[in-house]
Amino acid sequence: MNKLLRSRATAALAVGVLGAGVLPGLAYGATTTTTTSSAACGISAGSITAAGDHRIQSFVATRPITRTENRFVARGIHPAGQAKLTSSWIHGPAEEGNSIGHDGNVVLGTVLYESGYLVPRGGGTPHKYQTRIGGGWGAFKSLEHSEVLLSSTSLRQNEYGLRTDGTLQRWNRGSDSLGRPVWRASGSAPGFSAVKTMALISQTKTYDTFLVNTRGGALYTVRIPTVSPMKPVVKKVRAATWQGFETMIAARCGAAGTLLLGIDKDTGSGYLYAMGHANGTATVIQGLGKVPGTFTDSLDFAWHGYSDPKLFGE
């Protein structure tokens, strides 16, 4: 991907932890104009429309929940009807001129691309770019990217894909001598065929963690250490009632909590939850209610700012 993605982890070190929210008792307060312990946490949900447009809806965990943003980010980013899977996307000031960059992974048809675009500040026609990674992605149902700065000169970038047969696969993402992206397989694990959707909730130097729900309604954390061979550590969080969500989106809230948006595509509805630091069945989850707005576009994903603190929900 472009320089925006590769600089995100570095920029994250320069900002403080998000004030607020769900620590340790999952309290949430009124919105304030400063980042303080009483400020409410927020989350941004992106979507890809049937026409290939990108949209954003943002929510703040006030009482009642506030939708602070609902707009099209850019039109015609992907060919109409071609986007089948997407990772989360990041956005922020780009190195290429006076513009805002947007980067993510997307499957068009059955082909995976590292994709992105630049939008001039103040609006205008987006400049699109993408790099083909490879075909065969018709057999996948989830896709995600995680990166963490290991040192001043070392960046860990991992890509994850969940196959329809229940195999979770991981790649290490790097670059060749010309700066082109290279994905190298770095492990796989079977046994996830019952999973409906997965949301990244933790990114550390030594592991990534996903929150997953199953068709039977259970909720689990899946911690994936960065070492090889790849051996996920699975913990049950809840035994039932979570089967209704086709998409889950996570944002960091406080020092170690998560703001979780569950999207029910059957009804086009979204529900917000505040989660404490995940600890198996002892994890505290507080339902905050139905969010204003609807979710009727083709695909939903998490929007993150390039300077957001790393996720640390488990």
Image: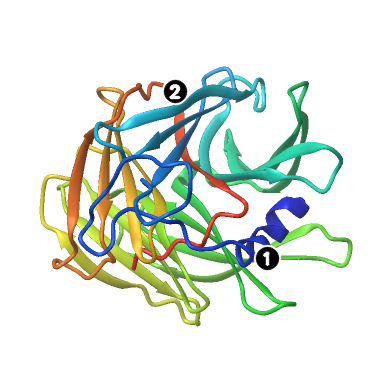
* Cα–Cα gap, marks 1 and 2: 33 Å
Say whether residue 252 is left or right of residue 82: left
- The spot of residue 96 in percent (x, y) is 85, 44
Q: Position of residue 205 (x, y in %)?
A: 53, 77
Q: Position of residue 213 (x, y in %)?
A: 25, 51
Q: Quadrant of residue 280?
A: bottom left
Q: Tell me if residue 153 comes above or below residue 305 in the rendering.
A: below
Q: Residue at x 18, y 44 (%)?
A: 287
Residue sitting at x 35%, y 21%: 294
Q: Callout 1 environment at 10 Å: few (<14), some (14 to 19), or many (20+)?
A: some
Which residue is outermost to the left? 240
Q: x and y percent of residue 51 in the render? A: 58, 17
- Residue drawn at (14%, 66%) of the image: 281
Mark 1 residue element: helix
Q: Which residue is mark 2?
A: 297
- Picture colour scheme: rainbow
Please name the residue that numbered disc 1 is placed on: 10
Total count of labels: 2
Residue 114 visible? The answer is no
Q: Which mark is residue 62?
A: none
Horizontal side of 281 relative to 180 (left or right) equals: left
Identify the image quadrant of the C terminus: bottom left
Q: Is residue 272 left or right of residue 159?
A: left
Q: Amino acid at mark 1?
A: Thr
Q: Foreground: 257 or 264?
A: 257
Labels 1 and 2: the sequence-earlier one: 1
Q: Amino acid at mark 2?
A: Asp
